Amino acid sequence: MGNQFKTVALLGALSGLLIAICYWVIGGTSGLITGIGLAAVTNLISWYQSDKIALAAYRAQPVSAADAPGLYRMVEKLAARANIPMPGVYIVPGQTANAFATGRDPEHAAVAVTEGILRILPEDELEGVIAHELTHIINRDTLTQAVAATIAGAISFLAQMVSYGLWFSGGSRDDDRGGNPLGILLTVLLAPIAATIIQLGLSRTREFSADAGSARLTGNPRALARALQRLEATARQLPLDANPAFEPLLIINPISGKFLGNLFSSHPDTESRIEQLLKLEQQLSTKY
């Protein structure tokens, strides 16, 4: 119930920001109606097309049991253990090591891994990664992240268009158009940052939850901890290129650095995640 409330709050904040930007830029009733319409259309498209949007952003290709038997069987086994429908299985071309899940619910979900992660992770660590992504599907994180990414991307795009308009017009504006000059300035300067902060506010806690779900599903928290450590080292060298709005979907965020990197990262730092997994390992060993 708490997770659902946070989801509604996140989407409401992003949609409200999008409506406010349209009101500031266009002005009056027209701006308000445009903002509401844009927010509604963006939410509707991302709700029904979230999996396709994310998969296309990373050029993920579907694979069958014949194409990737080991990976397919692993996903099938873990999905059965988690009691969810078999998700679509995709592979992202390239040397980068990363993974993500997407889809509006367990009946319309997909798990994608890169060619690089298949090469560098042993079976038990890859299993931990897959279980992490399946937990995102179980918790409905994939819908929230995809919709949030779409709306945040729209906000950033709108702010960019406004800044281009101001640049080429020399900052002039006709009074009868009704826009608020201060609002336009705030849109250009603050809207992308605000969208990012709102979007990241929930995804960090969701990563801890997905890590814990993976540990319970596999019974091997240390395997995921080792995988995260390995992925952290490789992701900095070979980040996965795509629209930055979709980075919260990934199991590892390639942003490096202690202060600014963590401030604008959609994930908690890897050391904290590993620490939590090792604590969970102790709890599981004590329990059993």
Image (cartoon, rainbow, N blue to C red):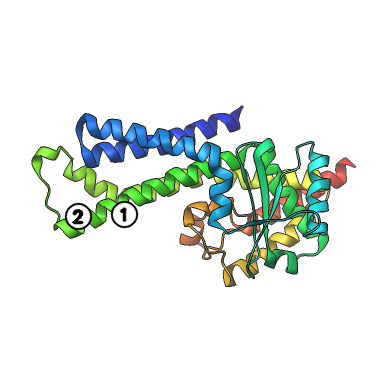
Image disc number at residue 160: 1
Report helix, strand or loop for mark 2: helix
The percent position of residue 67, horizontal first and vertical second, equals: 77, 60
Residue pictured at 68% horizontal, 50% vertical: 111
Position of the C terminus, as image quadrant, is: top right
Q: Are marks 2 and 1 in contact (CB under 8 Å)?
A: no
Left or right: where 227 falls relative to 16: right
Residue pictured at 82% horizontal, 58% vertical: 69
Q: Which residue is mark 2?
A: 166
Report helix, strand or loop for mark 1: helix
Residue pictured at 25% horizontal, 35% vertical: 31
Query: Real-space Cα distance between discs 2 and 1?
Result: 10 Å
Please, what is the three-letter code of the amino acid marked with disc 2? Leu
Looking at this rendering, what residue extends furthest in the bottom direction? 237
Using the rendered view, name the quadrant where residue 134 is placed.
Answer: top right
Position of the N terminus, as image quadrant, is: top right
Looking at this rendering, what residue extends furthest in the left direction? 175
Please, what is the three-letter code of the amino acid marked with disc 1? Gln
The percent position of residue 150, horizontal first and vertical second, equals: 46, 45
